[in-house]
Amino acid sequence: MFGAAQAEIEGSVHVGLNSEYIWRGIDQSGGNTSDSMTEAGIDLSLGALAGWDFEAGIWYASGNGNTGFADEVDYYASASRAFGCGVTASIGYIYYDFPSVPGPDVLNQELSFGLSTEFSGFSIGLTHFWAIDGDNDGYTELTLDRSFELCSKTSLDLGATVSYDIETSDVHHYGLSAVVNYAFNDVLTISPYVSATFAQDGAENGVLSISGNEDDELFGGVIVSAAF
């Protein structure tokens, strides 16, 4: 499969600095707001086969504060296919690895199932995440995004998220984000952003909760990416 798609491989690498590590509306840094997070990653588009587009990537995160959090490496892959009426379906796999934590990894694999479409300039996505190991009925996100061209090299991306925790039958959190993308050239882009999350009962009581860390959060950062 990958031999047939080899000539079409393209992608991007990035590095970033974030004021906090907020994952699905929950602070991952032990509640210490002084703990910033450094990240790096690579995303690959592997080409198409039998109507399916394949992608894969690796993402790394490390805390910079006094308490910080365990270094994290995520490995992920996905396949997507466009169907009629402008709808795209996708299936994905994520492995969460914590190399600095002793002992076996637990609750570290997820499958995702998604649907997305475009409507009146908006990108709409619905994705369900299901943990392969562990007793977890899943977590679902509904996203709404729109991009605006500000000038020839600059765009503004606005996004909104509503998530739901099936385990507790509660709304998990709401999220808002704004990203400014400035393209230096065809390769290099810098993207400062600001985000806000608003924790709900699902974040406080669900399987993803971390005691004391389910507060409303305002955070930001900057990502520098290079396409190839």
Image: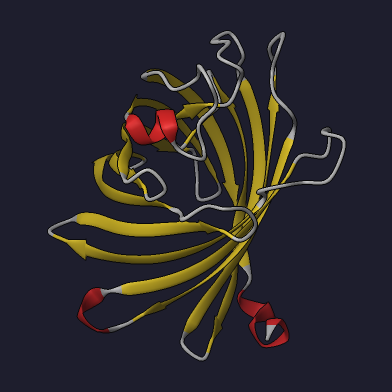
Q: Position of residue 12 (x, y in %)?
A: 60, 52
The residue at the point 67 percent across, 38 percent down is 40
Q: Nearer the viewer, residue 182 or 99?
A: 99
Q: Nearer the viewer, residue 103 or 56?
A: 103
The residue at the point 82 percent across, 39 percent down is 99
The residue at the point 66 percent across, 48 percent down is 107
Q: Is residue 104 left or right of residue 6?
A: right
Q: Is residue 24 left or right of residue 151?
A: right
Residue 211 in sight: yes
Q: Nearer the viewer, residue 64 or 110?
A: 110
Residue 205's quadrant in the figure?
Answer: top left
Would you place residue 147 above or below residue 28 in this image? below
The residue at the point 26 percent across, 57 percent down is 124
Would you place residue 145 above or below residue 54 in this image? above
Would you place residue 143 above or below residue 72 in this image? below
Q: Position of residue 50 (x, y in %)?
A: 51, 91
